[in-house]
Amino acid sequence: MQVAELTMPAALRVGDVVLADASELLTDTDRRQRASLELLRQASIEAGLLAEDDPAPEAGVISEAAAEAIDQYLLQQLRVPEPDEAACRRHHAAHAAQYAIGERVQARHILFAVTPGVDVQALRLRAEQALLEVRADPNRFGETARQLSNCPSSAQGGDLGWLNAPDCAPEFAKELFGQTEGTANVGVLPRLVHSRFGLHVVEVLARDPGQAQAYEAVSEAVAQSLRQQAWITALRQTMRVLASRWEVQGVDLDAADSPLVQ
């Protein structure tokens, strides 16, 4: 089973700047974000937008001047085309569920919480094993949640009740809501869900698709979604160029949809 979040044994480095040593436990997402910010910081220095003596990041935190310079650099470098109406209508037709009102999901989960000092790799392996077990026998989900979950819902077998998207962390909601017909699973989701709280084994018990909206009612939201997709594509292209100029060690920047937007 392929899982996106892994700890990496190597030190994290961009050019001559070490961003994390081999002993520091970070998720792949944290490593991608640190490396991407450092690439952009170094590019901003080269472009004359940031002083050469700007301090290297400490624990992933860049200076205020670096943050402002990176914003300016991206404004200069990223070219995002305005989506036309035909593209917007095609997107809406293919992703109508994303723009429905009142979509609800009844779900339960098993949370493997990421807390300070936890061995993330060992935690991931336990979560993977639990996922395999409950996919093989979904009737064991409630019992497994009571035994393993770090969420208070474990007392109810992991039951979260009926959820709307605003009830959830955005990265959690992304996996449950606005799905296409092919991905709107009912049952145990086939992969771990990653959120700011940790790793989740999730079972969708029921779905209420809500009320579909005509294109005219959501046209601006559709256009904004396409702008965001275009921005992410442009960002990825820029990051590839930068990664070819400053060597990146300790993480694969192409392993996620975007190095900075999760």
Image (cartoon, rainbow, N blue to C red):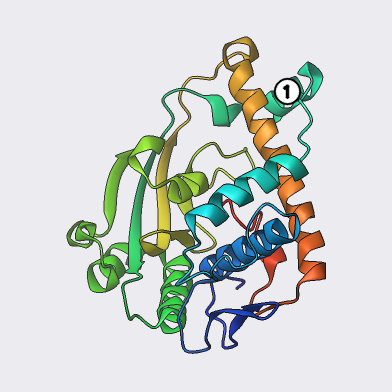
* Left-right relation of 252 to 135: right
Q: Which residue is at the front of the view, 165 or 136?
A: 165
x, y (%) of residue 71? 61, 45
x, y (%) of residue 162? 31, 39
x, y (%) of residue 78? 75, 42
x, y (%) of residue 70? 62, 51
Q: Which residue is mark 1?
A: 88
In the image, residue 92 sits, relative to residue 250, either above or below, namely above
Query: At 31% across and 75% down in the image, what residue appears?
Result: 116
* Left-right relation of 159 to 73: left
Query: At 35% across and 69% down in the image, what residue appears?
Result: 112
Q: Taking the image as drawn, is residue 246 in sight?
A: yes
Instruction: For label 1, count other residues whose C-alpha is less than 10 Å away and answer few (under 14), some (14-19) or many (20+).
Output: many
In the image, residue 134 sits, relative to residue 212, either above or below, namely below
Mark 1 residue element: helix
Give the image quarter of residue 129.
Answer: bottom left
